[in-house]
Image: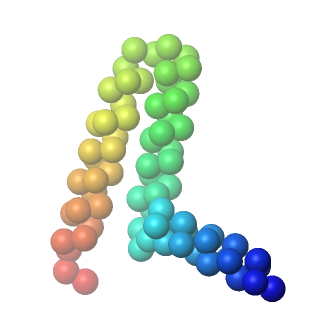
């Protein structure tokens, strides 16, 4: 029983750490990383510039969403 509780707490910690209150941001980051990896594997020159640009867009969207009045 203790091992199950420990594993459950460990999983909840990582879910809260990675996803937190914005699962769309975690999914967006995962998609950007996969897309950048795919472009790099295909040796597309623009692939290296995709990662920082897309992450900046995601950060901007997240900040914009966070400052809107609810």
Q: Is residue 45 left or right of residue 27?
A: left
Q: Nearer the viewer, residue 42 or 20?
A: 20
How many discs mark residues in the rendered view?
Answer: 0
32 relative to 28, above or below: above
Compared with residue 51, is residue 20 higher up or lower down, i.e. above or below? Answer: below
Image quarter of residue 65: bottom left
> What's the residue at 34%, 40% (across, down)?
54
Q: Is residue 68 left or right of residue 54?
A: left
Residue 19's x, y, as percent? 48, 66
Which residue sits at x=49%, y=21%? 40
Quarter of the image with the C terminus in it: bottom left
Residue 70, above or below 58: below
Q: Is residue 16 left or right of residue 68?
A: right
In depth, the one of 69 and 40 nearer the eye is 40
Q: Residue furthest front?
A: 2
Question: Which residue sits at x=46%, y=58%?
Answer: 26
Q: Give residue 43's position: percent from left, percent from top.
A: 50, 14
Q: In which quarter of the view is residue 47 placed?
A: top left
Report if residue 23 is visible in the image.
no
- Snapshot quadrant of residue 60: bottom left
Q: How is the image coloured?
A: rainbow
Question: What residue appears at the point 76 percent right and 79 percent down from the top-left corner?
Answer: 4
Estimate the x, y position of residue 50 in percent, counting from the top left.
36, 31
């Amino acid at each position: 029983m203790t091992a199950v509780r420990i594993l459950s707490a460990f999983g909840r910690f990582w879910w809260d750490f990675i996803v937190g209150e914005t699962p769309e941001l975690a999914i967006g980051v995962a998609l950007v990383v996969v897309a950048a990896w795919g472009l790099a594997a295909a040796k597309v020159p623009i692939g290296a510039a995709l990662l920082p640009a897309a992450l900046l867009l995601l950060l901007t969207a997240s900040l914009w969403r966070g400052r809107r009045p609810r």
